[in-house]
Image (spheres, rainbow, N blue to C red):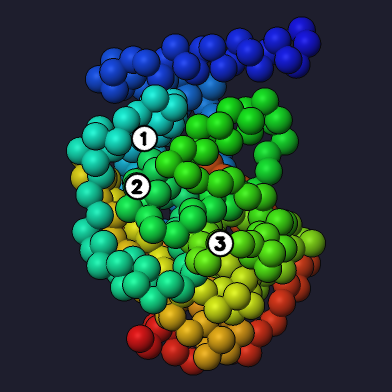
Amino acid sequence: MPKGLIFKIQKLGVQWLAGWPLSRLYRLSDLLFPILYHILRYRRGLVRENLMRSFPDRSLNEIKSIEIEYYRYLGDQFVETIKAFKMDDQELRHRITIENPEILAGLFEKGQSIMHILGHHANWEWYSKMLAMNMQHALWFVYKPLSQDGFEHLLAGMRQTHGIQVVPMKEVSRRLSSSLEKAVCCYFGSDQSPTAHNRFMWIPFLNQPTAVFLGAEELAKRHNMAVVFGSMRRKQRGYYSITMEKLTESPADYEAGAITQWHSAALERLLQEQPQYWLWSHNRWKLNPNQHMGVSPNAVSNPNPTH
């Protein structure tokens, strides 16, 4: 079947489902759980290994409980992402609360560009839309291109609402240097696994050596961007809260690797609190510290930012 026809069928299917109310979509999610977990056993070995290495102090029963909750949430996340194609502003504001909007308001007043870092925890697609609705800067959704071109095109279309621009990771620095915008906010997921060709550093994260992208820190320093970490917590099915933490307004003042350690530590605290909503089926630890050196910035003595 031609790729163009497959894409049209996918688009029509997604748009049809996006018109369903969330209550109906959640019933679909309930059906997805046994399919993903029991029948397809989607990446169950990887998820179990990731959980056991990340939480060595938790019992096997606790690990299994997190695992099952994760697969239940995976279905919810899938249908919520579909709903995002046709979700109006009123429903988003009803379902998501920003606990401390003053963090952004102060930076808007100063006209400083923002590196808004988060992990793939809870619903980052809804997060970006809610952020855009409260944004005075231009918002760039920074993404790593996928191999599935048709699905990527669908996601890009869904993300480009409320003035959001989708920007491939490799183009961000050039775009920042040439942008006519006075100030921008880069929405940057920091927790994907880098490849051996990316710039990354090794840090202790979830009880194991972890390769972490240096891109967000280096871009913030190069373009004097304030660095904000965002945490999204699930309150109940379909409802979330967002809390933001300003890490620094002067990234160049800190030694190499400091900001990367700070935002990684903030994510780890969030995962200790709500582990079941992170993307455990992602092969996060595919690089080996004995085989891939990464960048070796100076040791960071202070693991917490000073404001």
Residue shown at 41%/69% (left/top)? 228
Q: Secondary structure at mark 3?
A: loop
Q: Is residue 218 left or right of residue 98?
A: right
Residue 73: give its label. Answer: 1
- Residue depicted at x 29% and y 51%: 233
Q: CA distance from mark 1 to mark 3?
A: 38 Å
- Foreground: 112 or 99? 112
Label 2: which secondary element? helix
Q: Residues within 10 Å of mark 3 (few under 14, many from 20)?
A: few
What amino acid type should be assigned to the residue bearing mark 2? Met
Dot 1, crowdedness within 10 Å: few (<14), some or many (≥20)? many
Q: Which residue is mark 3?
A: 181
Is 211 in front, or is 44? 211
Tag on residue 133?
2
In terms of sequence position, does the residue under pointer 3 or pointer 2 come before the other? 2
Q: Amino acid at mark 3?
A: Glu
Q: Is residue 119 visible?
A: yes
Give the mark nearer the N terminus: 1 vs 3. 1
Which of discs 3 and 2 lies nearer the camera? The answer is: 3
Q: Residue at x 37, y 68 (%)?
A: 108
Q: Please say if the residues under marks 3 and 2 sit with CB atoms less than 8 Å apart.
A: no
The disc, 2 or 1, on the residue closer to the chain's N-terminal end is 1
Q: How many marks?
A: 3
